[in-house]
Image: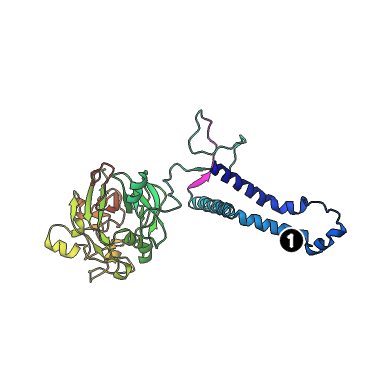
Amino acid sequence: MEEKKDKLARVQCLARLVGSGSSNVDHAEPTQPINNTDKFHEEKNTEPEHNKGRRREMKTMYSCGPELAALEHSIRKLENKLLIGTWQVEHLQMYKYFRPFQPAEPESDSAPGVNHNTSGTSDSSDMTQMKPLPPAGSLIVHDKDCSELFDRLRPSSGFYRIRPKSHQDPFLVYCDMEDGGGWTVFQKRRHGKVDFNRDWVDYRDGFGDFKLWNDEFWLGNEHIYSLLLAEGKNLVKIDLMDWDGQKSYAFYDNFKITNEADKYRLQYDMYSGKAGDALAGGGGMVEQWSTSLSGMQFSTRDQDNDRYLQGSCAQENKAGWWFNRCHAANLNGKFYRSGKYKGQYDNGVVWGTWKGLWYSLRHTTMKVRPLVFLDAMGSGAGDI
């Protein structure tokens, strides 16, 4: 009963607050004749009517303090939601996640997610999401990487925004939610349309296309550096496919790189898999001495940080990569079609311990997730 009385009092208080401005003038009581006997009181209490109305309004505001504050807070929240919604629509339009609606042939069932014009006429300003595109990601970024996103939402594979470190801006990545889920992809080769023979700045900041599932890209050494845990408790998987559709893979524990001041030096621990340990240079001592990539700095055509004194591995192999003298693995090399190739240098997309240095692979993917991760099957190992 007391609660109902309290709510009624609040409603009456707000009603008085809303109506107080007009009641002070529009509903003022008519002036009554003044008797001579009341002249003294009249002179003593003389005060302009608008001042009295202002005092009554202030009194009402003080009595409705909590309700007024709550009302102002609600208005601010609605204004913020409107601002964020406007920004999100502009963001999606800018990056072409939406396109003008094109009327399709009438169907018995309406397609989900399509906005229909209530007037019954088609309008080119209507917007609908493009089917070929992956999810655009949330405006508000909660996740450090794709493994956290997988644990939280179990979404499908696609492009999402992540924030590995709280002080940096979010950026777009491709999340592989198959293969056990939770993989953040930082390199992908598919069709050879993207040129990987780039300068240092391009490899530092990243390049390629970030729209479709089969787009090629290099995420960028700065993003890779922030993505790979400083303590190195990561698992990197390298997926490979030849031109006959055969697949193989390699795992590396504690895969990480240093910062730009140290030229993004590569470090990793244990290898496992079926494709062979090409990052270590192969089986022989001589091969490992000249082609092992452990501890090597990153090189590009305009920054030579390799150990090859007679030339530049990056220039010869048309790629930015961790080179020694030079390599047994180079997944950023020149894209040759049909696999086997000939040339002055073994500069293809190669994994020497699987197909040799003169066979250029068709598909490659480099992806990472935490070393300790409970995948979709509950095994912690993923689907090989």
Q: Where is residue 130 in the image (x, y as percent from the top left)?
A: 47, 43
The amino acid pointed to by label 1 is Asn
Q: Where is residue 94 in the image (x, y as percent from the top left)?
A: 50, 53
- Residue at image position (27%, 54%) is 349
Q: Does the magenta segment cover residue 103?
A: yes
Q: Where is residue 323 in the image (x, y as percent from the top left)?
A: 25, 64
Quadrant in the rendering for residue 315: bottom left
Does residue 73 sit above or below 128 in this rendering? below
Q: Which residue lies furthest to the left in this view?
A: 285
Q: Does the magenta segment cover residue 125?
A: no
Whether residue 345 is visible here, answered yes or no, is: yes
Does residue 101 sit above or below 342 in this rendering? above
Q: Quadrant of the C terminus?
A: top left
Left or right of 50 on screen, residue 332: left
- Residue at image position (82%, 51%) is 30
Camera-side residue: 306 or 184?
Answer: 184
Camera-side residue: 319 or 48?
Answer: 48
Residue at image mark 1: 51
Whether residue 191 is visible here, answered yes or no, is: no
Quadrant in the rendering for residue 164: bottom left
Q: Quadrant of the N terminus?
A: top right
Camera-side residue: 178 or 334?
Answer: 178
**Total residue callouts:** 1
Secondary structure that dominates the magenta span: loop
Left or right of 379 on screen, residue 44: right
- Residue at image position (83%, 59%) is 38
Disc 1 is placed on an element classified as helix
Camera-side residue: 333 or 175?
Answer: 175
Magenta region, residue range = 97-106
Q: Position of residue 35 (x, y in %)?
A: 86, 57
